[in-house]
Image (tube, helix red, strand yellow):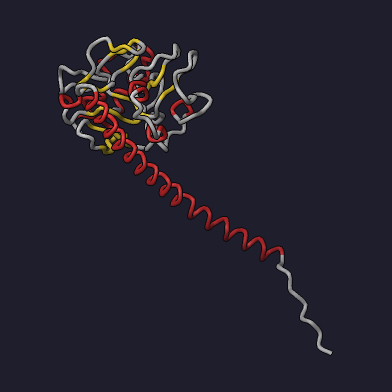
Amino acid sequence: MLRKPIARAFTLVELLVVIGIIALLIAILMPALSKAREQANNVKCLSNLRQLGTVYQLYANQNKDQIPIGYSTGQSWTGYFISDSSGAFGLMGCIYQANLMDAPQAFYCPSQNDPRWQFQTPENPWPPGVAGVLTRVGYTSRPSVEWAGAIPKTPMARMTRLKNKAILSDVLGIPLSSPDFTSVHHKKVNVLFADRSARPVDTAAYDKQQKQIQSVGFSATMSLYLDETNPDADTIWNNFDKN
């Protein structure tokens, strides 16, 4: 009578070797997977910006070439509002009210990990327009025009006059924040230009200004952000224009 062969179990040493090999493979693959994920997010972010370029062009076509870019309540970095704490729609809120925000996820960078600038989070609720809360998009606009709630204090910027100037970028220029904090794509910032092209710009274009903004905090002045009268000025948005 033939006996069945006895199954041989793995020894503890063999199991540890297998586990070690798996851990080593994971350690080798994780950086590559993380890099591939970031590259995919960067491509998606640039695609989002190009879509927003089309959205802004549609808005301009409907509103005598005007587009709602700028900043709110004297704070040069706040070009990302859809609605403010009063529930008023200004800046990006004009795009929302014009029914040009059918796919709101396109207004948010997939690399952004701060919930204040992510889509539909407790810190950034959706839909917008609720009194007592702020709703933001995940990109910020050129601080060309100051807004008071839903009203621009001067005429809105005209898209054709902006030509090849930068009009949107990843969120940046936040007071008390380091350049690394505001650079979600690491060493580059994605920027949309008025000709509807979008491309990455090296963070060297704004690192110096962001460091100053970090040190002066909420007293940061417009001179660090933009000078429309002098294209050669060493400011964040003027430097974007040169790229």
On screen, 87 above or below 14? above
In which image quadrant can residue 43 be found? top left
Q: Nearer the viewer, residue 214 or 201?
A: 201
Across and down, in percent, residue 167 comes to 25, 27
Residue at 35%, 38% (x, y): give it.
Answer: 45
Residue at 39%, 29% (x, y): give it.
Answer: 138
Across and down, in percent, residue 207 comes to 31, 28
On screen, 24 above or below 110? below
Number of numbered discs = 0
Across and down, in percent, residue 46 comes to 32, 39
In the rendered structure, the answer to whether residue 93 lies left or right of residue 165 reads right
Q: Residue furthest right?
A: 1
Q: Nearer the viewer, residue 232 or 27?
A: 232
Q: Quadrant of the C terminus?
A: top left
In the rendered structure, the answer to whether residue 120 lies left or right of residue 92 reads right
Q: Quadrant of the N terminus?
A: bottom right
In which image quadrant can residue 219 be found? top left
Q: Is residue 206 visible?
A: yes
Across and down, in percent, residue 48 comes to 34, 37
On screen, 229 above or below 36? above
Residue at 42%, 34% (x, y): give it.
Answer: 105
Q: Nearer the viewer, residue 17 or 9?
A: 9
Q: Is residue 211 visible?
A: no
